[in-house]
Amino acid sequence: MIRLTTRGFGLLSTGVVLLIAASATGVRAVAWPGGLLIGLVLAAGGLTWFSARRPTLRRRLLPDRLAAGSPMRVQLDLQRDSIGAGAWSVVEETVPPELTGAPALAVPSGWGGLRSVHEYQLGTTVRGRYRVGPGIWVTTDPLGLASSRRGLGGTSLLTVTPAVHRLGTLGTAAGAGLTGESAQRSSSLLGADDALIREYRPRDELRRIHWPSTARMGSLMVRREEHAWEPSALILLDNRSGAHSGGGSGSSFEWAVSAAASIGVHLLDAGFDVELTDASGRTLAPEVGASAREVLLDHLTDVHLSNAYELSGALMQGIGGRGNLLIAVLGRLSTADAMALTNARTDGRLCRALILHAPDGPGTDPAELLVADGWQVVRDAASRSVADACAGFGWSARG
């Protein structure tokens, strides 16, 4: 559809007024400028109409799947039969506000067939699935009297997965964790039913106290029977809206999603079977093979905040037997949350927690309940990078 610009409407109005004045006064000299102005506006509209025929547009996203924070290129291939000489045309791309850098691309004018290839970059800051396009074909005459805007081409799907950070090397069973390879090697060296010793906890049975180790260590130690350690992990992502703060790419929830993605990919690379669950009970079952990483990142691309209020005991009991390594990525932690999390700890299970926010106000730190139950805890994790926070588990930095 052809529309007059403000300038074009002003000239047309002036021409009409001059013609009316010429008719009313009989002064023909006034009619000539009026007719010239009207003719100029009509000519501009005709040129714009002729040049407004839409070209064929093909769009390529290079790549169409990438991690948040990574730049990408968009390639536009424009082809049309003809374009009016002197007309000014641009392609404006329709881009979601979460993506940055969409330009208006000028298209050269001329007679005859024309093909042009344009490229521009988009910045990605927040994970999600976005539609790039359609383009808007904007044509204006050289004097800027008339313009046309028409939709051009369809949309292209862009998948922005959570940012994955490189983490340090996993430690040993006595330290922060096990790689799948070292876990299997340790199990094979110890045997299927070897006695392992750990510190006494209040709920332990007295008959399991290992007196020789107690005498040697100077504190109560208990004996537990361990079967071969299978490299399996469960990641608990706290997606409660009330547990997080901030918005967009700088929110604590986006930090938590990136941490869960980084830990999950890191464990997959180390040979673990990885399962993921969130505070609302939405679970991603373990995947094996080359697709495991892609499935995990797809799941985390689509995860959203929930209205769940607290980490329920039922949820914790449901995850109690899943994964020999439990890593919880938590927002704000209440005493009720910490007590529910203690239900998830069982003999032989390594439990780790990243707590993003410090407790509100003075008083008892709920994280102490986890520490007393045998969890390894990193507090105020969101004030650090994901890699630095995970280094608190003893995952040594990589060179």
Image (cartoon, rainbow, N blue to C red):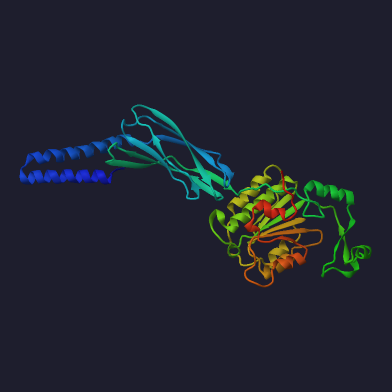
Q: Which residue lies at the image location 68% right of the left edge and 70% below the top edge?
A: 335
- Quarter of the figure with the C terminus: top right
**Pick the front one: 102 or 278:** 102
**Pick the front one: 323 or 196:** 196
Q: Which residue lies at the image location 89% right of the left edge and 70% below the top edge?
A: 206
- The residue positioned farthest toward the bottom in the image shown: 363
Mark count = 0
**Pick the front one: 358 or 155:** 358
Apparent side of residue 276 relative to residue 248 in the rendered image (left or right): right
Can you give x and y, in whole percent of width and height, for residue 371 in the image?
A: 75, 65
Can you give x and y, in whole percent of width and height, for residue 218 in the image?
A: 89, 66
Q: Quadrant of residue 109?
A: top left
- The residue positioned farthest toward the left in the image shown: 26
Apparent side of residue 38 relative to residue 292 in the rendered image (left or right): left
Apparent side of residue 180 relative to residue 84 in the rendered image (left or right): right
- Quarter of the figure with the N terminus: top left
- The residue positioned farthest toward the top in the image shown: 112
Can you give x and y, in whole percent of width and height, for residue 370 in the image?
A: 73, 65
Residue 179, placed above or below residue 106? below
Can you give x and y, in whole percent of width and height, for residue 134 in the image?
A: 44, 43
Apparent side of residue 193 relative to residue 96 in the rendered image (left or right): right
Residue 386, placed above or below residue 2? below
